Amino acid sequence: MILIGTMNLTTTRDRGDFHCPTCAATKSYRLRARRPWLTIYFIPTVPVGAAELFVHCDQCRSTWDLTVLELDQQSHEMAQESQFREEALRSSVLIVIADGAITDAEIKSLETIGSHLLERPVDREELGQLCSIAQQNQIEAGNYVLTVSRRWSQSQRSTALQAMFLAATADEMGETQTKLLARMRDTLEFTDLEYEQAIEQALLWEGV
Protein backbone atom coordinates (compact mmCIF):
# COMPACT_ATOMS: atom_id res chain seq x y z
CA MET A 1 0.00 0.00 0.00
CA ILE A 2 1.35 3.41 -0.98
CA LEU A 3 1.03 6.06 1.74
CA ILE A 4 0.11 9.40 0.17
CA GLY A 5 -0.58 12.63 2.06
CA THR A 6 0.30 16.30 2.36
CA MET A 7 2.45 18.41 4.65
CA ASN A 8 3.33 22.09 4.93
CA LEU A 9 6.92 23.17 4.51
CA THR A 10 8.07 26.61 5.62
CA THR A 11 11.23 28.28 4.33
CA THR A 12 12.93 31.63 4.88
CA ARG A 13 13.19 33.78 1.76
CA ASP A 14 14.59 37.01 3.15
CA ARG A 15 15.61 38.85 6.30
CA GLY A 16 15.60 42.46 7.38
CA ASP A 17 14.42 45.00 9.94
CA PHE A 18 10.88 46.37 10.33
CA HIS A 19 8.67 48.20 12.80
CA CYS A 20 6.91 45.41 14.71
CA PRO A 21 3.39 46.46 15.81
CA THR A 22 3.51 44.08 18.78
CA CYS A 23 6.96 45.13 20.04
CA ALA A 24 6.29 48.78 19.09
CA ALA A 25 9.93 49.04 18.05
CA THR A 26 12.28 48.20 15.20
CA LYS A 27 13.09 44.49 15.19
CA SER A 28 14.56 41.92 12.84
CA TYR A 29 12.23 39.81 10.77
CA ARG A 30 12.22 36.80 8.47
CA LEU A 31 10.13 36.68 5.31
CA ARG A 32 8.73 33.17 5.41
CA ALA A 33 7.01 31.08 2.75
CA ARG A 34 4.61 28.29 3.68
CA ARG A 35 3.59 25.80 0.97
CA PRO A 36 1.78 22.45 1.01
CA TRP A 37 3.55 19.48 -0.55
CA LEU A 38 2.31 16.09 -1.68
CA THR A 39 4.08 13.34 0.24
CA ILE A 40 4.74 9.71 -0.53
CA TYR A 41 5.74 7.66 2.47
CA PHE A 42 5.98 10.98 4.37
CA ILE A 43 8.58 12.32 1.93
CA PRO A 44 7.74 15.68 0.22
CA THR A 45 7.70 15.15 -3.52
CA VAL A 46 5.49 17.66 -5.38
CA PRO A 47 4.44 21.20 -4.30
CA VAL A 48 0.69 21.73 -4.20
CA GLY A 49 -0.72 25.25 -4.76
CA ALA A 50 0.94 28.60 -4.28
CA ALA A 51 3.20 29.58 -1.41
CA GLU A 52 1.78 31.73 1.40
CA LEU A 53 4.15 34.56 2.35
CA PHE A 54 4.20 36.14 5.81
CA VAL A 55 6.48 38.22 8.03
CA HIS A 56 7.79 36.64 11.25
CA CYS A 57 9.17 38.86 14.04
CA ASP A 58 12.33 37.32 15.55
CA GLN A 59 11.69 39.03 18.90
CA CYS A 60 8.02 38.38 19.78
CA ARG A 61 7.38 35.68 17.14
CA SER A 62 4.23 37.43 15.90
CA THR A 63 3.35 36.92 12.24
CA TRP A 64 2.04 39.56 9.88
CA ASP A 65 0.83 40.11 6.35
CA LEU A 66 3.46 41.55 3.98
CA THR A 67 1.84 44.99 4.17
CA VAL A 68 3.37 45.41 7.64
CA LEU A 69 6.71 46.07 5.90
CA GLU A 70 5.21 49.21 4.35
CA LEU A 71 4.53 50.79 7.74
CA ASP A 72 7.17 52.92 9.39
CA GLN A 73 7.02 53.87 13.07
CA GLN A 74 5.22 57.16 12.41
CA SER A 75 2.55 55.50 10.24
CA HIS A 76 2.02 52.81 12.86
CA GLU A 77 1.65 55.34 15.67
CA MET A 78 -0.85 57.34 13.60
CA ALA A 79 -2.88 54.18 12.96
CA GLN A 80 -2.81 53.32 16.67
CA GLU A 81 -3.96 56.82 17.64
CA SER A 82 -6.82 56.69 15.13
CA GLN A 83 -7.90 53.32 16.53
CA PHE A 84 -7.76 54.66 20.08
CA ARG A 85 -9.99 57.62 19.26
CA GLU A 86 -12.61 55.29 17.76
CA GLU A 87 -12.43 53.10 20.86
CA ALA A 88 -12.76 56.08 23.20
CA LEU A 89 -15.94 57.16 21.39
CA ARG A 90 -17.37 53.63 21.55
CA SER A 91 -16.58 53.54 25.27
CA SER A 92 -18.49 56.80 25.77
CA VAL A 93 -21.47 55.44 23.85
CA LEU A 94 -21.47 52.27 25.95
CA ILE A 95 -21.43 54.30 29.18
CA VAL A 96 -24.47 56.26 28.01
CA ILE A 97 -26.58 53.27 26.93
CA ALA A 98 -25.65 51.14 29.94
CA ASP A 99 -28.90 52.11 31.68
CA GLY A 100 -30.96 51.07 28.65
CA ALA A 101 -31.93 54.59 27.56
CA ILE A 102 -30.45 57.60 25.80
CA THR A 103 -31.69 61.21 25.98
CA ASP A 104 -31.38 64.13 23.59
CA ALA A 105 -28.89 65.79 25.92
CA GLU A 106 -26.72 62.66 25.87
CA ILE A 107 -26.89 62.43 22.08
CA LYS A 108 -25.82 66.05 21.71
CA SER A 109 -22.98 65.46 24.14
CA LEU A 110 -21.82 62.36 22.24
CA GLU A 111 -21.91 64.31 18.97
CA THR A 112 -19.60 66.92 20.48
CA ILE A 113 -17.36 64.34 22.15
CA GLY A 114 -17.13 62.36 18.92
CA SER A 115 -16.24 65.45 16.90
CA HIS A 116 -13.59 66.33 19.49
CA LEU A 117 -12.05 62.85 19.43
CA LEU A 118 -12.27 62.10 15.71
CA GLU A 119 -11.64 65.69 14.58
CA ARG A 120 -14.58 65.51 12.18
CA PRO A 121 -18.36 65.89 12.49
CA VAL A 122 -20.18 62.98 14.15
CA ASP A 123 -23.95 62.89 13.63
CA ARG A 124 -26.91 61.02 15.11
CA GLU A 125 -26.89 58.42 12.36
CA GLU A 126 -23.32 57.39 13.11
CA LEU A 127 -24.05 57.29 16.84
CA GLY A 128 -27.17 55.26 16.15
CA GLN A 129 -25.12 52.68 14.30
CA LEU A 130 -22.68 52.43 17.19
CA CYS A 131 -25.55 51.97 19.64
CA SER A 132 -27.19 49.35 17.44
CA ILE A 133 -23.98 47.34 17.09
CA ALA A 134 -23.38 47.47 20.84
CA GLN A 135 -26.92 46.35 21.67
CA GLN A 136 -27.04 43.59 19.06
CA ASN A 137 -23.75 42.15 20.27
CA GLN A 138 -24.57 42.78 23.94
CA ILE A 139 -21.30 44.66 24.49
CA GLU A 140 -20.90 45.75 28.10
CA ALA A 141 -18.98 48.97 28.82
CA GLY A 142 -16.79 47.60 31.60
CA ASN A 143 -15.69 44.53 29.66
CA TYR A 144 -15.07 46.52 26.48
CA VAL A 145 -12.86 49.10 28.17
CA LEU A 146 -10.99 46.38 30.07
CA THR A 147 -10.15 44.70 26.77
CA VAL A 148 -9.20 47.66 24.58
CA SER A 149 -7.43 49.75 27.24
CA ARG A 150 -4.59 47.24 27.51
CA ARG A 151 -2.93 48.87 24.52
CA TRP A 152 -3.69 52.48 25.56
CA SER A 153 -0.98 54.79 26.84
CA GLN A 154 -1.46 56.63 30.13
CA SER A 155 -2.37 59.81 28.25
CA GLN A 156 -4.92 57.94 26.14
CA ARG A 157 -6.48 56.38 29.24
CA SER A 158 -6.92 59.84 30.69
CA THR A 159 -8.54 61.13 27.49
CA ALA A 160 -10.90 58.14 27.33
CA LEU A 161 -11.94 58.60 30.96
CA GLN A 162 -12.65 62.27 30.32
CA ALA A 163 -14.82 61.40 27.32
CA MET A 164 -16.75 58.79 29.31
CA PHE A 165 -17.24 61.19 32.21
CA LEU A 166 -18.60 63.95 29.98
CA ALA A 167 -20.94 61.50 28.25
CA ALA A 168 -22.23 60.09 31.54
CA THR A 169 -22.86 63.53 33.06
CA ALA A 170 -24.55 65.05 30.00
CA ASP A 171 -27.90 64.37 31.69
CA GLU A 172 -28.85 63.26 35.17
CA MET A 173 -26.36 60.53 35.99
CA GLY A 174 -27.98 57.36 37.26
CA GLU A 175 -26.64 54.66 39.54
CA THR A 176 -25.44 52.54 36.59
CA GLN A 177 -23.21 55.26 35.17
CA THR A 178 -21.94 56.19 38.63
CA LYS A 179 -20.83 52.62 39.32
CA LEU A 180 -19.27 52.29 35.86
CA LEU A 181 -17.20 55.45 36.23
CA ALA A 182 -16.01 54.31 39.66
CA ARG A 183 -15.08 50.95 38.11
CA MET A 184 -13.08 52.72 35.38
CA ARG A 185 -10.68 54.07 37.99
CA ASP A 186 -9.52 50.52 38.72
CA THR A 187 -9.84 49.28 35.12
CA LEU A 188 -7.61 52.08 33.84
CA GLU A 189 -5.27 51.68 36.83
CA PHE A 190 -5.55 55.26 38.07
CA THR A 191 -4.62 56.42 41.53
CA ASP A 192 -7.24 58.54 43.29
CA LEU A 193 -5.24 61.67 42.45
CA GLU A 194 -4.83 60.72 38.76
CA TYR A 195 -8.54 59.97 38.54
CA GLU A 196 -9.48 63.33 40.06
CA GLN A 197 -7.06 65.21 37.81
CA ALA A 198 -8.47 63.52 34.69
CA ILE A 199 -12.01 64.49 35.68
CA GLU A 200 -10.92 68.09 36.30
CA GLN A 201 -9.30 68.23 32.85
CA ALA A 202 -12.52 66.94 31.28
CA LEU A 203 -14.24 70.14 32.35
CA LEU A 204 -11.80 72.06 30.14
CA TRP A 205 -12.93 70.37 26.92
CA GLU A 206 -14.07 73.14 24.62
CA GLY A 207 -17.72 73.05 23.64
CA VAL A 208 -18.62 69.94 25.66
Image (tube, rainbow, N blue to C red):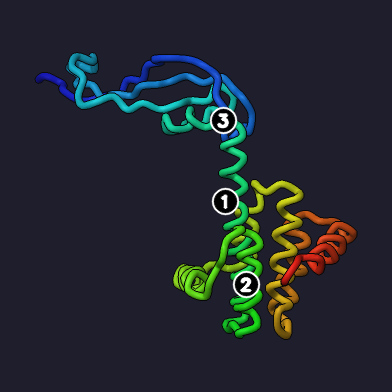
Look at 36% across and 26% down and name the residue there.
53
- The mark nearer the N terminus, 1 or 2, is 1
Q: Position of residue 159 (x, y in %)?
A: 73, 58
Q: Work out whether mark 3 precedes mark 1 in sequence or the reverse, and give the earlier one.
A: 3
Callout 2 environment at 10 Å: few (<14), some (14 to 19), or many (20+)? many
Q: Secondary structure at mark 2?
A: helix
**Of the image marks 3 and 2, the number of the one nearer the N terminus:** 3
Label 1 environment density (alpha carbons within 10 Å; few <14, some 14–19, many ≥20): few
Residue 197 in view? yes
Query: In which quadrant is the C terminus drawn?
Result: bottom right
The mark found on residue 110 in the picture is 2
Element under label 3? loop
The residue at which mark 1 appears reads as 83
Alpha-carbon neighbours of circle 3 within 10 Å: few (<14), some, or many (≥20)?
some
Q: Amino acid at mark 3?
A: Asp
Observer-nearest of 194 and 122 = 122
> Which residue is disc 3 drawn over?
72
Q: Is residue 170 left or right of residue 6?
A: right
